[in-house]
């Protein structure tokens, strides 16, 4: 039993690859019963002021957050900071560096798609996305490719073109897990390893990641997300228990058109885990 109000601690706005402006996102979350909210855009804190103001106006508790891209054993992983000081200069420089790498990566993906998938228009599309998006993600590129008629929907783009075995795959070159955790801890954040079940890692490698994350000073694992099966939730809860980590929960909402993933909709955390929301 938890007395905590419904907390959604993983949400994206249009400051990264979400569809809604922060104010509209907060409005939707409030309408879905969310009472405690963290905005966690990829690699930017640009939406936090607007989200904080709207939460104050609507009577929601707000935690400033960010979802930072990091590298671990050649893979991209995501690390969330919650309750952070958005003006922290070291975190600001870290995020700026990530956005610069994102632009370089997206242009490289455009070149690869031209060369390996004969999509001659891909470099120009990638350039346009980089010019228009403050945080250019593969989601932006995927939407633009769908808009250009190259694919039917985002899933199609990720499956055929951008996925790990696709022609547009560019190996990740992100600052490591240690740097991500340090930048977030330095800004006073509770540090959360995002959606551990989504990484392509063996059981042993995932345990290694969680142990390393805890040893670096990480605070919590994301245990309950939107669209997650019970088996994954149980597996992540076990990992959190074994590593002595708190637990976080959120929808990872991006887009109201994706009706299967909406703010506030995910399973309750197991009662024996400490909800990181209580620390925010
Ligand atoms: P990036 O951070 O640039 O590597 O882009 C990854 C983002 O793409 C994630 O944050 C998701 O929002 C999105 N994404 C990944 N796979 C899919 C998919 N199959 N369908 C729709 N969006 C996806
Ligand atoms: Mn995203
Ligand atoms: Mn993520
Ligand atoms: Mn996310």
Image: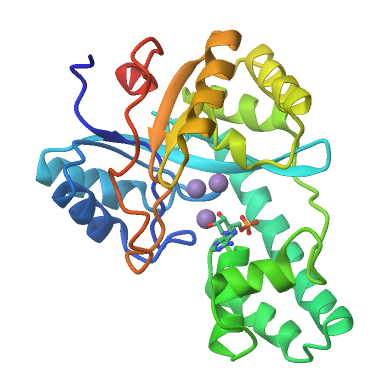
As displayed, is residue 110 above or below residue 65? below
Q: Is residue 158 left or right of residue 5?
A: right
Relative image position of residue 218 (x, y in whole percent): 58, 19
Would you identify the image quadrant in which residue 107 lies? bottom right
Quadrant of ligand 1: it is: bottom right
Residue in the foreground of this view, choosing between 121 and 45: 121
Residue 12 is left or right of residue 110, and the answer is left
Q: Is residue 56 left or right of residue 9?
A: left
- Image position of 84 with respect to 19: above or below: above
Spot occupied by residue 109 in the image (x, y as percentages of width and height): 77, 70
Residue at 41 percent of width and 58 percent of height: 254
Q: For residue 121, what is the image quadrant?
A: bottom right
Residue drawn 53% across the image and 50% down it = 42
Which residue occupies the extreme right position in the image?
115
> Is 69 located above or below residue 261 in the figure?
above
Q: Position of residue 269 (x, y in %)?
A: 36, 24
Is residue 192 visible in this depiction of the protein?
A: yes
Scheme by which the image is coloured: rainbow
- What residue is at 34 percent from the left and 34 percent from the top? 267
Q: Residue furthest front?
A: 231
Along the line of sight, which residue is nearer the eye, 259 or 32? 259
Quarter of the image with the N terminus in it: top left
For the C terminus, the quadrant is: top left
How far across and down, in percent of the image, does residue 41 sit? 46, 50
Residue found 64% across the figure and 41% down from its top: 94
Q: Nearer the viewer, residue 134 or 36?
A: 36
């Amino acid at each position: 039993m938890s007395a905590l109000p419904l907390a959604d601690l993983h949400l994206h706005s249009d400051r990264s690859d979400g569809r809604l402006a922060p104010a509209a996102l907060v409005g939707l979350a409030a309408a879905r019963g969310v009472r405690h909210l963290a905005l966690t855009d990829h690699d930017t804190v640009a939406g936090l002021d607007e989200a904080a103001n709207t939460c104050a106006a609507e009577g929601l508790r707000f935690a400033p957050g960010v979802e930072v891209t990091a590298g671990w054993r050649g893979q991209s992983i995501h690390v969330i900071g919650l309750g952070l000081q958005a003006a922290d200069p070291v975190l600001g420089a870290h995020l700026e560096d990530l956005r610069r790498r994102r632009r370089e990566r997206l242009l490289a993906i455009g070149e690869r798609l031209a060369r390996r998938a004969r999509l001659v228009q891909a470099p120009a599309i990638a350039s346009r996305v980089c010019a228009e998006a403050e945080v250019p993600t593969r989601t932006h590129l995927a939407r633009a490719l769908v808009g250009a008629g190259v694919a039917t929907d985002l899933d199609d783009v990720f499956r055929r073109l951008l996925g790990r075995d696709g022609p547009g795959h560019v190996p990740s070159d992100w600052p490591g897990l240690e740097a991500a955790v340090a930048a977030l801890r330095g800004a006073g954040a509770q540090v959360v390893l995002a959606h551990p079940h989504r990484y392509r890692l063996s059981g042993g490698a995932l345990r290694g990641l969680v142990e390393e994350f805890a040893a670096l000073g990480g605070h919590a694992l994301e245990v309950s997300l939107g669209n997650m099966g019970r088996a994954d939730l149980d597996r992540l809860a076990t990992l959190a228990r074994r590593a002595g980590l708190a637990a976080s929960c959120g929808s990872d909402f991006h887009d109201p058109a994706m009706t299967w993933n909406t703010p506030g909709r995910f399973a309750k955390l197991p009662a024996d885990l400490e909800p990181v929301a209580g620390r925010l």
